[in-house]
Image: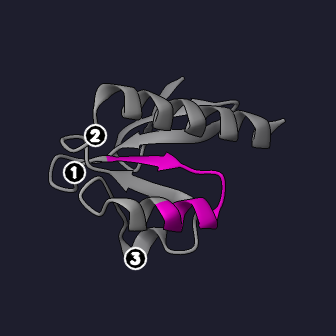
Amino acid sequence: MEKPWYGTPGFLVKDKGFLRIRSEAEGGIVVFVADLGERELLLASDPEKFFTTPHYDGHPTVLVNLGAVDTIELQELISESWVGRLRSAS
């Protein structure tokens, strides 16, 4: 389901957000990852693709630079975020 989230488009599964499109000024999207360990691995793996801000400290999320990821990787990130949030909502 699509629903505004912090003033920008957000997507929910079972009333839990799994993806948020950030404003043009902020850039990128927010996706949820399995845990903080996975978050740190992604952030360290490619800072051009994955980044964060202090707002997301302590949360299992990463910000994704849409211009730096290909379609297949983006699909995987969104799917994993959706499945993870679906499981946690059950």
Dot 2 and dot 3 residues touching (CB under 8 Å): no
**Residue at screen point 37% across, 66% down:** 52
* 75 magenta-colored: no
Q: Give the residue at the far front of this rendering.
A: 45
Provide residue 39's location: percent of width, then percent of height. Answer: 53, 62
Residue 69 marker: 2
**SS type, badge 2:** loop
Camera-side residue of 62 and 90: 62
Residue 54 marker: 3
Earlier along the polypeptide chain: callout 3 or callout 1?
1
Residue range (magenta): 29-41
**SS type, badge 3:** helix
**SS type, badge 1:** loop
**Residue at screen point 23% across, 47% down:** 23
Dot 3 and dot 1 residues touching (CB under 8 Å): no
Q: Can you identify the residue that label 1 sits on?
A: 27
Give the amino acid type for the residue marked by disc 3 in the picture. Pro
In the figure, 45 relative to 22: above or below? below
